[in-house]
Image (spheres, rainbow, N blue to C red):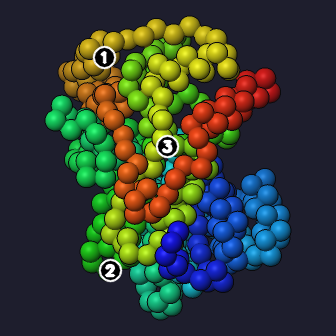
């Protein structure tokens, strides 16, 4: 970073979801960059908390492991007190129902925002709120706009996609935009693609689905919007430190993205062999349309798990760009895609043989 960070090394930084897959890497990068006062908001301690405390001692930094619940307004007020930068990574994952996802992503974010914009509690220290979102907030591809960038439209009817995670992420962003407008929240949004690496071994859903016994390969020649977890953490950290970017959003994807077909071939070669069937796009789209139609006809007897909006978002043919993050954040993927895939496949093999 050519410009000085917006926060001094001794000022407090808050990271929610700090012991999660991405959050632990964000905390580690902050410590490695010389920041010495990091508060980690986590629901429970685990092995990653111990690893981060050891790393903090090596860097002579103060690491405050704050155990709490974002559903508690009091915990949120205590956590944000004195924070100059907040990195908000905590989010509900694996929630099957929209109400549960809303409660554990949107309501929790509202509690954190209420605490962050309250001057008596925050001490007027806040200079940046970084929200980590996802590519799932974007609407499906249209023929006239195949390149997905920060100007691409967001999904206007998230409830019709039938995906609790994307619904919650879209509602989170709407809430954040409202707070930025009404309270002057110094907001920056980071939208990673599919974040992979050791600790997140499943095959990306954008490649296909193993739901039906045989793996259905749906991605075909589509590029996969992959970002290796270490590269993603670098971009998130820069979004909290770079001056002059309030109100902006940044997509994070790596360079030299493989196609779905290339990824699946490499996975079979380096991890394990299994049977897969490729469904051409016209076939998978038609199946999603029929599933959606039957769900509507049966008045929800069959949940609309697969539908055209979901197909457009996950398996519609798109291209991706990281140009804005490179220009505005001076971000570069420090782990090449070749090396990142090698590390990922090695981790997958270890999990398979465990």
Q: Is residue 168 visible?
A: no
Q: Which mark is residue 254?
A: 3
Q: Earlier in the sequence, mark 2 or mark 1?
A: 2
Residue 212 lies, with reference to residue 29, above or below; the image says above
Is disc 2 in contact with disc 1, using a CB cutoff of under 8 Å?
A: no
Residue placed under numbered mark 1 in the picture: 281
Residue 98 lies, with reference to residue 325, above or below; the image says above
Regarding mark 2 in the picture, which secondary structure is present there? loop
Foreground label between 2 and 3: 3
Residue sitting at the far front: 2
Write the residue at 31% across / 28% down.
317
Q: CA distance from mark 1 to mark 3?
A: 25 Å
Write the residue at 47% across / 61% down.
330
Mark 3 neighbour density, 10 Å: few (under 14) some (14–19) many (20 or more)? many
Q: Is residue 308 visible?
A: yes
| Residue 91 image position (x, y, % from top left) | 51, 54
The image quadrant where one finds the C terminus is: top right
């Amino acid at each position: 970073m050519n410009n000085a960070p917006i926060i001094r090394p001794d000022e407090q930084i808050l990271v929610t979801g700090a012991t999660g897959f991405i959050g632990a890497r964000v905390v580690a990068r902050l410590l490695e960059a010389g920041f010495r006062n990091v508060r980690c908001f986590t629901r429970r301690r685990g092995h990653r908390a111990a690893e981060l405390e050891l790393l903090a001692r090596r860097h002579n930094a103060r690491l405050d492991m704050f155990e709490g619940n974002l559903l508690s307004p009091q915990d949120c007020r205590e956590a944000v007190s004195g924070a100059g930068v907040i990195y908000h990574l905590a989010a509900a994952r694996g929630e099957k129902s929209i109400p549960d996802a809303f409660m554990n992503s949107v309501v929790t974010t509202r509690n954190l925002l209420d605490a962050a914009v309250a001057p008596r509690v925050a001490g007027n220290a806040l200079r940046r709120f970084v929200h980590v979102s996802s590519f799932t907030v974007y609407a499906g591809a249209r023929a006239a706009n195949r390149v997905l960038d920060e100007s691409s439209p967001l999904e206007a009817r998230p409830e019709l996609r039938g995906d609790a995670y994307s619904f919650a992420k879209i509602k989170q962003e709407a809430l954040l935009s409202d707070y930025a407008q009404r309270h002057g929240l110094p907001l920056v949004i980071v939208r990673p693609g599919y974040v992979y690496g050791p600790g997140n071994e499943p095959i990306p859903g954008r490649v296909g689905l193993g739901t039906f016994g045989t793996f259905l390969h749906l991605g075909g020649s589509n590029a996969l919007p992959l970002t290796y977890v270490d590269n993603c953490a670098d971009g998130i950290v820069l979004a909290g430190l770079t001056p002059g970017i309030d109100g902006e959003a940044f997509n994070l994807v790596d360079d030299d993205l493989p196609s779905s077909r290339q990824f699946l071939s490499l996975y079979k070669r380096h991890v394990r062999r299994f049977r897969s069937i490729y469904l051409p796009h016209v076939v998978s789209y038609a199946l999603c349309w029929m599933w959606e139609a039957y769900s509507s006809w049966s008045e929800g007897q069959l949940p609309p798990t697969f539908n055209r909006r979901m197909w457009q978002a996950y398996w519609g043919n798109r291209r991706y760009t990281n140009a804005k993050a490179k220009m505005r954040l001076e971000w570069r993927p420090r782990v090449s895609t070749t090396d990142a895939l090698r590390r990922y496949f090695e981790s997958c093999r270890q999990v398979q043989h465990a």
